[in-house]
Image (cartoon, rainbow, N blue to C red):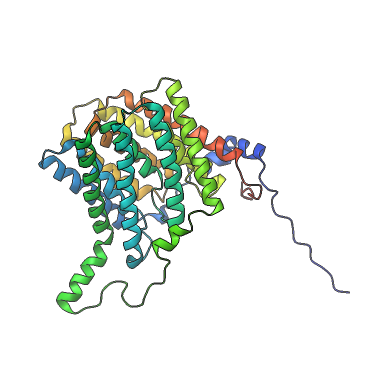
Amino acid sequence: MASTTVEPAGPAPLTRGAALAHPLRAHTWRSALAVDLSKASYAVPLRVGMAVGLVLICGGLTGLHDIAGFAALGTLISAFCRAEPYPVRVSRLAALGTAVVVSIGVGGLVGLSGGALTTEIVAISLLSGAAAVFIGALRAAGPGAVVFVFAATAAAGFVHDLTDLWRSVAAAAVGAALGMAASLAPWLLAHVRRRLTGGPALDDAAPVAHAPVRQLLAGAMQRHLLATAGRTMIAAAVSAVIAAAAGFSHPMWAAMGAVAALQGVDFHLTVSRGIARLLGNITGAAIAAALLAVPLGYWGAVAAIIVFQVAAEITAPINYAICSTAVTPMALLLTALGAGLGPAAAVDRVVDTLIGVVVGIVVAALTVSAGTRPDPLR
């Protein structure tokens, strides 16, 4: 009689109670601080930094300091799709650039309507859900939906009339075009060289099979994407309401913290990213407070933004806490270009992020899928 082999059972599905306890485990915090230097890269981060720097420098030279930040937000699409073949990137980057411009338009309309906090919370929360679905359907690896929420929030605080609206939207469109060009630069230069010398161009040796953007977006109504959108909208709205009720000056920063925390592909990554973002915000806020306390001026702020942006892009795959340490002063300085911020804004950033991270993790834990299984190494 043949013997039968009984496979050991895998770990039991993660319950809501275990999910809520997971952020309190020591290993969870250690994993958030893990550093993997093998994932470091420099070419893409430098191109992103150059794109951001170029629009900020042009904004300074032309006297358009107030809208240069919106152009810089547009260039951030160059941080997406860095692993995709160049022919695949073209349509995806175009879609991402359009999304940034639309996000700024939505935020601008909120500002144009009078900028009531309730209106802003509802609009930005709905936008965060739409952005989560969009990024998920497009399968665009990169900074995530938080970029679009940041863009909309910045526009809501900036736009007061139709002139502000079209200027901010136009600046974002210019920045998105430049960001797309920065991402595709090696491929475009290779085509130029081929025309001049007759040599081969990059990625032209064989056709690249990929789903077109229209087909990807047609599948946006998948159940798991809609569930992600629902969690993101709820967490963003609840975080902003709590921050507003507590009297903080920038409650939508709490919404951004929640959206960033929920960008993980599973619950464990959500927790890890949330902890890393919180720790990074604390150290980054200390740096930002010091910089905001001294008279950097426009050009000093631009130099610092470029350095922090490149550092964030280099460290993003290495360790998210280090990345957040660079992102926090970069975001605050970028906001200060048009709105003006003092050192106290750095403290607000930390507290708002804490609210967003906690709410994001709790929402993720309460809505954890019954089939989710814990990491056996944890």
Q: Residue at x 21, y 26 (%)?
A: 294
- What is the x, y in percent for residue 133? 46, 50
Can the viewer see residue 256 in this picture? no
Question: Would residue 128 appear left or right of 333 to someone viewing this image?
Answer: right
Question: Would residue 279 appear left or right of 198 to someone viewing this image?
Answer: right
Q: Residue furthest left?
A: 62
- What is the x, y in percent for residue 271? 53, 41
The residue lying toward the viewer, choosing from 99 and 72, is: 99
**In which image quadrant can residue 23 be found?**
top right
- What is the x, y in percent for residue 352? 42, 29
Q: Residue furthest bottom?
A: 198
Q: Residue at x 19, y 79 (%)?
A: 198
With respect to residue 285, does 13 lie above or below?
A: below
Q: Residue at x 33, y 40 (%)?
A: 106
The residue lying toward the viewer, choosing from 201 and 159, is: 159
The quadrant of the rendering that contains the N terminus is bottom right
- Figure label count: 0
Q: Residue furthest top?
A: 247
**In which image quadrant can residue 156 be found?**
top left
The residue lying toward the viewer, choosing from 317 and 76, is: 76
The residue lying toward the viewer, choosing from 331 and 306, is: 331
Can the viewer see residue 135 in this picture? yes
Q: Residue at x 84, y 70 (%)?
A: 3
With respect to residue 331, does 204 lie above or below?
A: below
- What is the x, y in percent for residue 27? 57, 41
Question: Would residue 368 appear left or right of 306 to someone viewing this image?
Answer: right
